[in-house]
Amino acid sequence: MTSLARMKTLDTERERREGKKVSGRRIVRFGDHVEPDVKIYFRERGWHIWNKEAGHSEHIWHLWWQTRSFSPDIHDDAKAYQRINKLTHGRAITCKDLLAKNLERMRVRFGPNYDFAPKTWVIPAQAKQVSEAVRGLNHENGDPPGFICKPARMSRGRGIFLFSSQSELKQKMDLENEKIMKNREEKQRRQSIRNGRSPPTHTQAKVKSQYGLWVVQRYLSRPYLLGGKKFDMRTYALVPSTWPFLALVYKRGLVRLGTENYTNASSDNIYAHLTNYSINKDNPEAKSPKIVQKSTENGRTSENFTNISALAEDGGGLKWTIEELLRYLGNNGVDTVRVWKQTKDLMLKTLIALIPDCKLSPCSFELFGFDIMMDQDVNLHLIEVNMEPSLAMPSPLDKKLKTSILNDIIQLLKVDVLASHPPPGPPPVHPHGAAVRLLRRIRKKKDPKSISALVKGYGGCFNVHPGFYGDFEQVYPMDAASMIGTLELVAKV
């Protein structure tokens, strides 16, 4: 036996021994900043929390859940019975600057099929284009601010502002940069004190170099309103496998409302212009929302608007469910079948933008949160995609929805089954090379059944429980042709 073969045999024996150690005990490992409600969810369902002090080794876990990306070696070293809750390349659509770049790349290739997001620029790289766009802004007829600016790598509405002129952009960006830098320095100082180290001395330039990326978007100036309030839809998508590529959309979701009536008069009223729950929950007006029985909005008179959810259920009237929104829209003459179809189409096209950078990681999956807005013509616009959509459960409405999402993910990924019966490790497959080889074989075949058989078997590692999706709906692939399209994107042919 060669030394290489002996090493492989020893690795296999070690994996088998480790598999026996964790067999029957479901162990979840958490990274930093995981929502407390997520930890409670797993603890209440009998999961053991990974703890190095309790004697758990680095390899003894079934599910590793954290809010940040994992280092490549963690993906490479994962065993067949383990699951990691981040894709290797998910940031391609969850970082605002990378999302803009990749959607533009898809728009160049596929044209107007990718015209569902507001025009976006990245600063400082595209500062000149932003200046030109601002100069061309029409300020007549009481138009609202023409642009919205956001830190490219921050979440929960932090640092966002609206502007209409170049001077306003510079003034507000300098102010927000100063806040970001001070908050970052204070966070590092507290962390150092907790760890018993001396506080670091950072120059503002160093901090700014990390947080100096911004995105500027055309502002959606004519939003569809609910009782005079602006809203967005938070929908969820799951990619449980990248090779073969599989995309699922959750059939339920949330609608998040602003807490003050939308108006063009002021761009500084964040409670009217932003719909982030993390911002609006702190508005005193949110404590006693006014329920509108009749209003004229969106070009029609509505007598159907009401906060359908009881205030105790939805965290103070700040949220609806997607089902409630569709019911309200249907009562006001909107084609809700078209709305939901457009929603899934927009989400799928965004997820497909991941495929050209697909990397094999058979044990990884990712849940994405999509923020989508509707204009007065009932067209949908993608605002952003969230890397770690909040799974906090501050209200019964949140708990019901997010518990259901977690239940379906755990069952769909077969984590419970893998905990009891650890399988051997997955075979290594290089996506690009496999895609090229498979495409060549497909093009030689003329029999549709043979093509389907080839496509169905490609990749060699499919981690999804056959026949169970819960409330997730498969949106990709739908047939052999769409899977061949995936191969062509991966192979870049």
Image: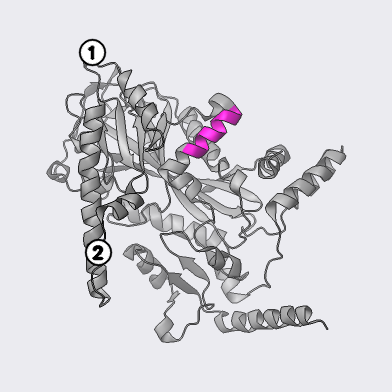
Vertical relation: 269 (above or below) 202: above
**What separation in Å lies between label 2 and label 1 (alpha carbons)?**
50 Å
Drawn side of residue 429 relative to residue 134, left or right: right
Drawn side of residue 264 relative to residue 242, left or right: left
Q: Main secondary structure of the magenta part?
A: helix
Q: Which residues are magenta?
A: 101-110
Q: Nearer the viewer, residue 195 or 322?
A: 195
Magenta residue check for 108 = yes
Q: Is residue 317 visible?
A: no
Between discs 2 and 1, the one toward the N terminus: 1
Magenta residue check for 370 = no
Given this view, does label 2 or label 1 mark the residue nearer the observer?
2
Q: Position of residue 26 (x, y in %)?
A: 50, 75
Residue ranking furthest to the top = 141
Label 2 residue SS:
loop
Q: Nearer the viewer, residue 363 or 316?
A: 363
Query: Can you tell which mark lies on residue 169?
Result: none
Residue at which label 1 appears:
141
